[in-house]
Image (cartoon, coloured by chain):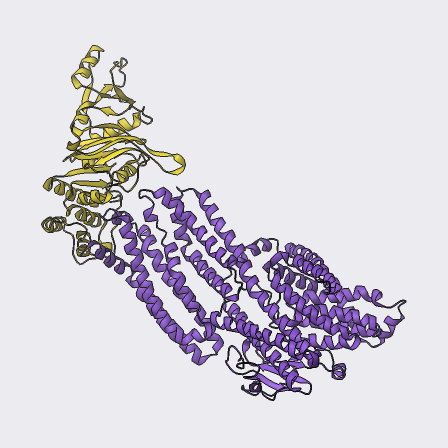
Amino acid sequence: MSENSNAIVARGVRKAYVRKKEVVKGLDLTVKRGAVYALLGCNGVGKTTSIRMITGQLTPDAGEISVLGLDPVKDAVKLRRKMAYVAEGQKLYDWMNIDDLIRFVKSFYPEWDDKICAHLLKMFELPQGVKLKDYSRGMYTKAALLAALCRDPDLLILDDPMLGLDTAARREFMRGVVDAIHEFERTVIFSTHIIPEIEALSDYAGIMVDGRLVLEAPVDEIKSSFREIRLPADAENIPSLPNIVSIRDTGEDKIIIVKGVESEMTAALHQAGLRFFTVNAMPLEDIFLAVTAKTKSPEPDGVSKITD
Amino acid sequence: MKPYQALIWNEWRRMRGMFLATAGATILLYLALLGLGIMLSVRDIDTAALLISYLLPDLLALIGFVAFQGELKSRTDSFLLSLPISRGKIFWCKYLFNLSLYAVLAALSCALFFPLAMPIVGGFTIVIAIMWPAIHVMAVVNPLMQNSPGGKAGGWAFAFAFPALFIGIQAIVALYPCNELRWTGISISITSLLLWFFVLGMGHYLWGSYLALKRNVLRLLLAAAGTLIIFSTILFTAAYVYSGWNLAASKRAALAAGLELERKPAEATPEAKNDALQILDSLQQYQGRLEAVKPELPSLSGRNSNGGYTWRPVPGDMKAMRQAADFILSDSSAVKLYADLSQILDKPSCWFKMQKIPGTNLSAVEPIRNFLHDRAYALELGGHTPEAFACLDLLDKLAVAVGYRHNSMGWLTLSKLRIAVNIGPDTMEGVKYYEKLLHELASIRPEFYDDTVTWLKYTADTFTISRGPLRPFLEFGAFLLKPRYQESLVNLLRWQIAYKQLFEQAATAKYAEVYPRMLNLNKLAPLIISVSPYQIQQCYGQRGDIANMQLYLALKIYKAKYGHFPETLAQLAPEILPEIPLEPITGKNFGYHTEDNGFSLQTESFLLTSKKAEPVTYSYHTWDKTASEAETPPLPRNKRREAPAPVLTNSKEKTK
């Protein structure tokens, strides 16, 4: 795979904060150009730290990162010109209104596109002449997104921008994101743990557990690789399937989550003499929960690569 | 709009409210000051100007803090840092712009300050203006830089640059080969400003350091502790020593010269007059420096209740002495003994009682003498001067009680003299008393007079040569090298050391018993001391004393030359004094009045007046054996206020 086809490549990246406690413990991450990448993980697994290293705001203790072919630390200014970053709970200058914000941010970007700006302004329905501090949370976050998109960045990084938004605001924001992504092709990294909102949007997903990426693959492949098998509660012969992720007894059913090919699973179940069972596809959120539940302490080589 | 223009625009919009509020507050405060000056007295302007001079950097400092800390507080830092501009440019844009805001405000302040308050407070604002950029640098220790490349090194550098700056500044102040009051003034100014920085910027600094030191609280505390230790030890000790002892030495030298002229006008005039003129000159230089710098002295001193200054410069000593004196005055056994002694010695019949004691002589009354002697000394050092004088009066009565024997009288008077030498040159009342004691001594043993002058010169020397805790040893060394210094000096030194230890222990024990936590809190006291109007008063008090001593000495020189005192002070200039010193606060001439055997000087300025703001008259008498015998010992201070006021020559008469 050519490096140029990748927007972000991180290899063996580590970062520690207090008393040598590592937050990121060897991150290997690849984001292809033009893809929408969902970086998934629970709170505190190192998503924001990883993203801040990718944006150059933090320096890695070890490992290498290349973003759009640039070193995020050494080429920070150059990179920031090509990249847009909306942080978790992004705050803007409250004294500004949306026109002030546009005027301010525009001065840093020669490639600022007024047409895109006007279009987004209309699309996001942001009221002009109102101070940002008087915006609703959803509007505020959309204003931050607007400031990020109008510069037409090659890479857009959204670090949990929906955190703290209520459902209505979250959907309002997501509509804006979906429209923006569809209209302007660019690489997007979306860090979040609100998975249903971005499932349909994402091309790739990476799941972080305890400072490492334990699964990284195209979303469709992830979804086709995991199956939920439901057996009756009294089923005694549980087949010895390879790659069982988890087994759960709900009282009515036994639920087995398995990674693998569906036809092979079905064959194995029949072979075990089971007649009553269902094999279901799983939403990304359930897969995420199963994987994170299983992989609390993954081995160093625990990154699952479903595709190359 | 270019990037830096956008940054400045943003900065201005963020700071605009605070800047305009600060400018408005500055103008309003100075207008209020003007109003105060019209409605109230000069004293209030003095205080208010000082307050404003504090308030202004206070507000300015806030601007500096908000520039960087405000970004963190409002969480706009990640947005700012996501812009394609280097951290260095962001930093300098913010820093320089805020500095320029400061410059505008400082100019505004100076423009208002100088015509209104400059004649009183002087160059304090200039010092603030000079120091501000440095403070600003410290104030904007920027957590924004924490995560930049080399952030670790930067963080460590910031964390330790702060204490290092303190060390550097204080080392310069402490080690600079010039122990003039000028440096004390600068040192104190720096201290006060840095204290403001402490108050306002510590939160910011701690946050930055906390991040820089990788959130290690222990390292942070170590850095802060180092700062505090350096702060409280070097600065206050050095600053205070410099201010106190020069003045003490000058006063003693001046007094010795004046007395020398007095005693031997005929043979000593040419040489002694030269010495006196030299001392006068040094006093004038000293006065000039005070005028130029107008520093604020630390409030660590044991300022005596009657406006004098102790020569003991170490704060701990003074505190101990105050505690000791309070202890003496409250200790029931000491109070009772003193009351009994007063009662006995107040009755003429006690003379006979005392004389009936077998072998009544110095050794028999020595315990009593020691008691009164120690009590007077401790009370004086503890700031209870009227009580100390009353105690000395009682010592006089004791001398009468033992029958005026010359040997006993000599001893007792010498004891009084030892106390008076500490009280004497430090207060104007003491000078008078001192002279009187010398007359008494000379009436018994004329050589005492010369010896005492030698002694005064000696103490002037020791004040010049010795510093801090080494002082007793240096004094002793000087004594060994110069045997002519009398044995009594050694006794005095021994006694001083032993006495101090005894009373310190007793007072500390008593104090700890009553206020168990207070002693620990007291250790923190120097950290919260800053320049106050009280210290300004001290400064003016010193200047007033110096002016007084200048006049005193000049009048003595005039007398030595013409055989009589001048009718007005104006006659001293230009022959003896280039110009007549004025009272420092009012700018008016001292009140001057010749008396039968001497002269009196009077001031109406608050600084040199009593607690009830009544003017004080200082009378000086020439040495005249017959006259001195007829005079009564000086009254305790509380009785002196009833003395008739002299005629004022140049100032409005305010006394009853």
Q: Using the image, determine if residue A265 lies above or below residue B208.
A: above
Q: Quadrant of the C terminus of chain B?
A: bottom right
At x 56%, y 55%, the residue is B523
Chain letter of the yellow region: A
Is B235 or B401 nearer to us in this picture?
B235
User: Does residue B462 appear left or right of residue A139 in this picture?
Assistant: right
Residue B307 in percent (x, y) is at 60, 72
At x 18%, y 15%, the residue is A264
User: Does residue B426 appear left or right of residue A177 in this picture?
Assistant: right
User: Does residue A44 appear left or right of residue A34 in this picture?
Assistant: right
Residue B391 in sight from this viewpoint: no
Q: Quadrant of the N terminus of chain B?
A: bottom left
Say how many tags the image has.
0
Is A124 or A304 nearer to us in this picture?
A304
Residue A290 in percent (x, y) is at 27, 26
Residue B135 in percent (x, y) is at 39, 58
Q: Using the image, determine if residue B367 lies above or below residue A138.
A: below
User: Does residue B347 appear left or right of residue B109 in this picture?
Assistant: right
Residue A206 in sight from this viewpoint: yes
Rendered hue of chain B is: purple
At x 70%, y 76%, the residue is B435
Is A64 or A145 nearer to us in this picture?
A64
Is B612 or B193 nearer to us in this picture?
B193
